[in-house]
Amino acid sequence: MPGTDDSAHVPSSSQRISEWVAQQLLDRIARGELVPGERLPGERQLAEQLHVSRVSVRAALQKLKTQGFLTAVQGGGTRVVSSAGVMDGALTAMVRSTHQNLCDLVEIRMALESWAARRAAERATQDQIDTIGRILQAMSETNRDGGRAADDMDFHVAVAQASGSPVYLHLLSTIRDILGNMVEMKHTEPFMENHEALMIEHHRAIHQAIARRDPDAAANAVTAHLGWILARYRTMTEEPATPAAPQAGAPPSPGTPG
Ligand SMILES: [Zn+2]
């Protein structure tokens, strides 16, 4: 361990050091500096940032993985998981079991997201507003359906970050994971071919309201956007739509209910 002045506050015993490293990483998650889905820097980089050995970093990462805060990424590395991730299994099962539960979840998402948009209009930095704008631009330029769905989620995550609330980021991540787990709803929003222009328009209204610092308009724009989607979910029948051919990495089919 380098004996720099910066390391003066690092505890001495190796077990304590790894616990200290784990706490540093948890603090970054709690402050929203590391967000759900984000890949952590590598062991070497973390060791340099925190002035500790790679062994201590490795032990800290292992501990956080065991506790469910981090998960291994295929091909190496770790990423942050939602702190509420442990609920996903039970909630996913509930949401799958009845159409009403699914609609409730979308409705709850709508309430949470309008709160977040309001906060974003009040607190977003100019950088965060620009990021939302760039994602919106990418959405309107992407021709691939898959890319558009990914951009859509990026848009909502960017609004979440602009709200400045790590708690909200984790709640959104949990809801996103559950909706993403639904085989019949691979996309969190039903992006139909003939509604793409309308969807872009919805997102543009959200961006513009946040950019002009209008909390009421931002909340209303989200309610209009997700309300439209909720109406579509409600018209879907209890039976899931025929899922597309299973793709690599897709969750296993839950089997057709009832
Ligand atoms: Zn959207």
Image (cartoon, rainbow, N blue to C red):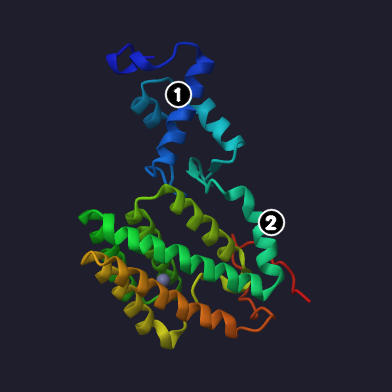
Kind of element beneath mark 2: helix
Q: Quadrant of residue 32?
A: top left
Q: Position of residue 57 (x, y in %)?
A: 47, 26
Q: Quadrant of residue 152?
A: bottom left
Q: Quadrant of ligand 1?
A: bottom left
Number of other residues with Cα within 10 Å of mark 2, as a class: few under 14, some 14 to 19, many 20 or more: few
Residue 139 in the image: x percent, y percent?
A: 34, 72
Asked if residue 202 shows in the view, the reply is: yes
Image quadrant of residue 240? bottom right
Instruction: Estimate the x, y position of residue 53 in percent, counting from the top left.
Output: 43, 20
Q: Is residue 37 above or below residue 247?
A: above
Q: Which residue is mark 1?
A: 54
Q: Horizontal and vertical percent for residue 106?
A: 54, 70
Task: Choose mark 2 or mark 1, whichever is in front.
Answer: 2
| Quadrant of the drawing holding the C terminus | bottom right
Q: Which residue is mark 2?
A: 90
Dot 1 amino acid type: Arg
Is 115 or 177 nearer to us in this picture?
115
Looking at the picture, which amino acid does disc 2 mark? Ala
Q: Secondary structure at mark 1?
A: helix
- Quadrant location of the N terminus? top left
Residue beneath the point at 54% across and 60% down: 175
For this rendering, which residue is in front, 51 or 19? 19
> Is 188 displayed left or right of 8 in the figure?
right
Q: Is residue 252 visible?
A: no
Q: Which residue extends farthest front?
A: 216
Task: Please indicate whether residue 167 sits to the left or right of residue 186 in the image.
Answer: left
